[in-house]
Every structure is written in C-alpha cells, then in structure tokens.
Amino acid sequence: MKIAVCIKQVPEGDARLVIDADGISIADADLATEINESDQYALESGLRLAESQGGEVVVVCLGPDRAEEAIRRALAMGAGRAIHLNDPAFQGGDAAATARALAAAIERENVDLVLTGLQSDDAGWAQTGPILAARLGWPSATLIMEIEPEGDTIKVKRELEAGWFQWVRLPLPALLTIQSGISTVRYATLKGIMGAKKKEIAKVTPADIGLAPDEVGGAGRKTRTTRLYVPEKTTGAEIIEGDTATAVATLVEKLQKEAKVL
Amino acid sequence: MAGAIWAITESGDDGLKSISFEVIACGQALAEALGSSLEAVVMAADGSAAAEALGAKRVDAVRVIEDAALAPYTPDAYTAALAQAIEADSPSLVLFPHTYQARDWVPRLAAEVDAGFISDVIAHRVDGDETVFVRQPYQGKLNSDCVFAGDGPNIVSLQLGAYLADDAAAGDGSAEIVKQPVDLDGAASRTEVLETFQEVADRVDLSRADVIVAVGRGIGKQEQIPIVEELSEALGAQLAASRPVCDNEWLPMDRQIGSSGQTVTPKLYVAVGISGAIQHLVGMKNSGTIVAINKDPNAPVFSVSSYGIVGDLFEIVPELTNQIREAKGTG
Ligand SMILES: Cc1cc2nc3c(=O)[nH]c(=O)nc-3n(C[C@H](O)[C@H](O)[C@H](O)COP(=O)(O)OP(=O)(O)OC[C@H]3O[C@@H](n4cnc5c(N)ncnc54)[C@H](O)[C@@H]3O)c2cc1C
C-alpha cells in the first residue's frame, strides 16, 4: 500500500503569536513550530498501515524553507521520503489553492491512499483534505477514528457529533482526514532522527507539477484574509488578582456569597 | 440583480435540525443588508415536513431537493445534488451550518462548482460593496476578516451558536415551496454506509452533575491528574476533561466534554488548563458559574467564564483544594 500523508507546519500550541507587520499573518521570528496535531495522527495512521500491509509512506508538505524541520521530524518518525512544495508562488494560498497544488503533486505518485489531518490548528479551514480528494476525483471520508484495510476497499469509522460514530466503506484510492486521538503517536527515536538525515526530500515548484504560478498560492486563491487581530473582549470573566492565597480566598468567597454555588 | 442567497438546512433521522434556523437567521440579516432574496434549501429523501417548518419563516422561497439517494447521507450524493442546483440557478451566496456533516462534503462541493469557501464563520458585516466574514483562526486565539476574491458562487459555513435560531424571524406564510429537480442516477455514491451507533452505552452521565471539574492539556501528564482529582473530591464534583486529555488516555473517553463528547450545564464548572477551543466551549458554555484557571490571560476560555485566575495551575489548584476543604469544614 502506497500512502501519501499531507502535513502542515503550524505554530506550537503554547507559542506566543505576534501579528506580522503585514497585518494578516504571524511573524516568523522566533516562532516555535510543530507538525499540526491531527496531521501527526494522520502520519501515525499511515505508518501503522504501511507496517501492517507493507508499502511506503510519502510525506507531502507545502510550506516555506522552515517547514523542512517538520518534514525531517516526519521522516524521523518513519516516513520513507518527502515531497516539499516550496516556492514563493505557493505562499499565501487559501485551502483551495493549497489543495490544487497538493493534488498536482500527489497525482504523479500513484498512491492508494491519502491521509490528512482534519483541520489545521492555525487557519482551521477544515477544507484542504476533501477539496484535495475532489481534485483527485477520489472518494473521501472525514474525522476518521479507525481504519480497517480490506484489499481494494477500506472500512473506516467516522466520528459524528455528541458521541456518535459511523462505519463506512470506500473503494481505493481514497482520501481520509484523520481525527486526533485515533491512536497513540510515536516519538522519533534517536536512530530515526539520524536516519532521517539521509532520506530524500524532493523540492517541488509549480512548474515541476504542471501548474502555472498564478494557479497556486495567493494568485490562485478564492478568498482573501484582509486582517488578523486580537479579538476585542466584550464579555468575559472577572479576573481575580493577587498572590495565589489571596486570589483563591477571594474566589472561594465569591463562589459562596455571589454565585452561591458552594 | 445578483442571485439569491441560499440557506442550506440539515436534516437528520428526526427531521430538520435546529441548527438550520441559525443559518436562516444569518441569511435574513445578509439578505436585508444586501438587498437579495433568501431561499431556504432542504435536502432529504422526504423533505415535506422540513419545508413546511421553513416556509413559516421569513424567506422568499423554500427549495426542496428530494431524492431517495439523499438518505442516508453520503458526500457524493449531496455534492452532486447541490452542484446541479447551483449550476442551474446560480445563487450568489450559499450558507451552511459548520456541522461535522458539512465538513465532510461542502469542501468537495466548493471544488466541484469552483467556489470560494469561507468556513467556520462567527459574524459578518457589510462594508460598502464588500461583505466581510469574521473567523477565529489559531484555535480561537485570534480573529480574522475574510472576503471573497471572486464573483461566486461563494460559500460560507457558520460556526454553531454564532447566530441564534430564535432570531430567525417568522414570515407571513407566503414563501413559495419549489421542488428542485436533480438527477442522481448517474452519480452513484462511492461511500457505502454500514452502521451508525453510539459508542459507550454505559458511560458516566456527566449531564446530571451539579459540579464539574474539567482538566485540559495544561495538566501536562497523566501523573499530575491527581491534583485535579483532589479538587474534584473536595468539591464533590465529577471529573471531566478536554479532548487531548482523553486522546492521550490520561482520563477515559467518556469524560470528554464538547462537540464530540458530552454537553453539560452544571451549577459550577471549573476549567483547569483548558484553552477554550470552540469544540470544548459548545459542551459547557451554558453552565451556571464557570471558573477558569489558565496561565494565558488571552485564553478564549475566559470569554465564557464568570471568574478567572491567571496563573500556574500547579500553584493555584492545590491552594484552591485546601481552601475549599476549609470552607466546607472538611479540611
Ligand atoms: C471536529 C473537532 C471536534 C472536537 N471535539 C472536541 C471535544 O468534544 N472536546 C474538546 O475539549 N475538544 C474537542 N476538539 C479539540 C479542540 O479544538 C481543542 O484542540 C481542545 O479542546 C484543546 O484542549 P485543551 O484546551 O485541553 O488544550 P490546549 O488548547 O492545548 O490548551 C491548554 C491550556 O492550558 C494552559 N496551561 C498550560 N500549562 C498551564 C499551567 N501550568 N497552568 C495554567 N494553565 C496552563 C495553556 O495556557 C492553554 O490555554 C475538537 C476539535 C475538532 C476539530
């Protein structure tokens, strides 16, 4: 089974987010990054399938030079090789533009299955996976919590709302978007990290995958972000100040006398 | 005149879902601001009851797309059906609820009809001739303004609870109910639906708890769970968690609060080391009194809380446990 796993490099969950001078993105300087959480689960699922079914995992990532750090991490976890869509023309795209580029790269690879995370922790469109499937002309299923390969078909468990689930079957090739928590994500071992240095990362430009620069990135997008900002607080908590003991004492008193819940 | 605004509703086994009226409410506001007509759209195997309920609202028409292939839901059938309707009638703007089902097929639809798609929108405003949609990227820590780069068709999905179902104004009953013919014979669904079920039948029912202490990823590791367990005991509370805590198996899955877990409304909800992503908030924001303890003063959880303490949970929670015990005379 040949599996492509799409990963995105995003700011770490705890990273301090500084809005860039352009007013629409996060400043790169000193930004701590990681592989998007649900993409880590997608990668783990791909690695497990390749281990149980035989085959290889190819990591596909669209991002600037710094995304190589995320790609190396994925290779250290066990992916065989990587495709890095890295060109200024790819930058500034929305989900539609990114999915078009990913589709063009993956089409050349003859894979049986594409796995993506269910959404990114930064932009959070929750669109790239299913658009990519549509561009490839393949069936897709989202929010996947279990995968059972069956040869030419695949049985997957979709998460629905409020604790409900659904098993569905899809013919291969297909695309799945993976939900966090599907399995336990492995750590890269020291051996893995050393081995990753020798693995191939193919750098790809729009021309390499048969696309014109104006079909991808900022030129190929259908939506535009005009401003990124800290939301104004209209409602919210009464923040209780003071050292720990004082703040806690005030809180307990408020819970007793104001809220009357103790 | 520009094409109509379509408000796409969602139906389940029990008929029309109430979230549909949130889409109608947004559609009414947009139609008024833009001078467009508004049409509610039903997609179902049998849409008559839904059409009647929607026809009572202030909409210009209810479009009913009925086909046996639309139940059970599959992404291929839904995409094919609505793509045909959009191509036939060219709406200017198509609104959806940002449900798990919409996540599954609406991006495919956007690709199919080559539409722009702004997803998970919390608000809109009309600035001259530009309609701006507000989103919450970076897990709700920041806001962004988004506009469409092309003429359409354009697609928007609305975050659950961003618009109020109660704001969907009633109409005078003049809405025309139109059957929209679609041909799904050639568009066989590739998805075979096997079984739909609820996972844990004998799960703890957190919805009955008066007091809940919920712990998030801020707790760091499983070995530190006892810190919140003690607070929970002191308060006579049920212990609950955000998703990453359950994903990491620090607490069992049936303790999860949020869109994929349980929805609760206790008298007191104490959120410890939880950032307050929307998928968590939908499960607890209607609790009576909410207390948040978080080291990040900008954590979105504070926006739904009554009281907050900004600081290190490893200092605050043990102190809180002690003082609660004293206050209750059990210390
Ligand atoms: C389709 C879908 C469904 C989902 N369903 C759910 C759901 O049902 N329930 C759910 O909860 N989530 C759900 N999620 C995930 C959700 O988007 C968030 O990722 C999740 O809620 C984050 O959990 P958290 O707040 O515990 O972790 P984080 O967002 O990582 O936040 C941890 C917080 O802890 C704080 N912190 C860290 N250390 C300390 C310390 N020492 N002292 C004080 N504070 C500290 C940090 O400041 C931060 O705010 C879903 C996501 C999707 C896309």
Image: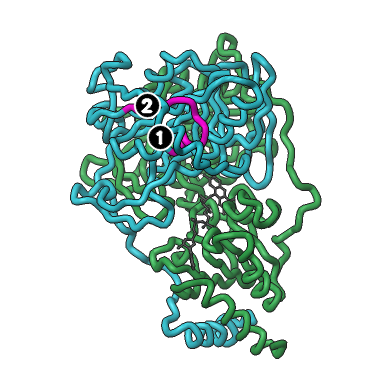
Chain colours: A cyan, B green
Between the residue at mark 1 and the residue at mark 2, the CA separation in whole angstroms equals 8 Å
Residue A81 colored in magenta in the image: yes
Q: Furthest residue to the top? A: B186
Looking at the image, residue A147 sits to the left or right of residue B314; the answer is right
**Amino acid beneath label 1:** Ile
Identify which residue is drawn at 32% across, 62% down: A232
Identify which residue is drawn at 60% across, 13% down: B188
Of B165 and B69, the residue lying toward us: B69
Image location (x, y in percent) of residue B217: 54, 58
Can you say whether B123 is above or below B214 in the image? above
Identify which residue is drawn at 42% across, 45% down: A34
- What label sits on residue A201 in the rendered view? 2
Residue tagged 1: A71
Asked if residue B176 shows in the view, the reply is no
Choose the circle earlier in sequence order: 1 or 2.
1
Q: Determine the secondary structure under disc 2.
A: strand
